[in-house]
Image: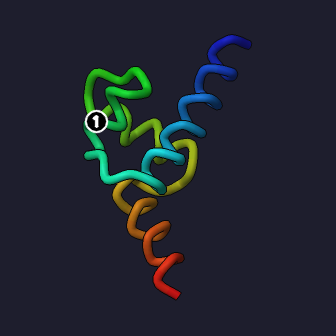
């Protein structure tokens, strides 16, 4: 459905922004169409199992090896 496609695109863009930018969680949320960071955080956790900040920390620590 359209919603599944939209969520997939939002997830992929969010992952890219969190991994490769210094944008705030709120800025990432706005960039992908959410009006509140808390709503984005809940959606992101549903998509990945991690909060956006946990994902960013894990992503950044992968590069520290």
Q: What residue occupies the far front of the structure in this picture? A: 21
Q: Is residue 59 left or right of residue 52?
A: right
Q: Is residue 26 left or right of residue 60?
A: left
Q: Position of residue 14 (x, y in %)?
A: 48, 40
- At 53% from the left edge and 76% from the top edge, which residue is drawn? 62
Q: Residues within 10 Å of mark 1 (few under 14, many from 20)?
A: some
Q: Secondary structure at mark 1?
A: helix
Q: Position of residue 41 (x, y in %)?
A: 36, 42
- At 45% from the left edge and 45% from the top edge, which residue is drawn? 17
Q: Position of residue 2 (x, y in %)?
A: 68, 11
The quadrant the N terminus occupies is: top right
Image position of 50 with respect to 45: above or below: below
Q: Is residue 30 left or right of residue 47?
A: left
Image position of 25 with respect to 3: above or below: below
Image position of 29 with respect to 35: above or below: below
Q: Quadrant of residue 53?
A: bottom left
- At 40% from the left edge and 21% from the top edge, which residue is drawn? 33
Q: Which residue is more in the foreground, 23 or 45?
A: 23
Q: Position of residue 27 (x, y in %)?
A: 28, 36
Q: What residue occupies the far top of the structure in this picture? A: 2
Colour pattern of the rendering: rainbow
- At 45% from the left edge and 60% from the top edge, which residue is drawn? 55
Q: What residue occupies the far bottom of the structure in this picture? A: 65
Q: Which residue is mark 1?
A: 27
Q: Quadrant of residue 3?
A: top right
Image position of 22 with respect to 38: above or below: below
């Amino acid at each position: 459905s359209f919603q599944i496609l939209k969520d997939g695109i939002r997830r992929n863009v969010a992952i890219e922004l969190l991994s490769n930018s210094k944008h705030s969680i709120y800025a990432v949320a706005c960039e992908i169409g959410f009006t509140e960071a808390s709503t984005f955080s809940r959606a992101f956790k549903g998509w990945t199992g991690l909060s956006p900040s946990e994902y960013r920390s894990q992503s950044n620590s992968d590069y520290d090896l």
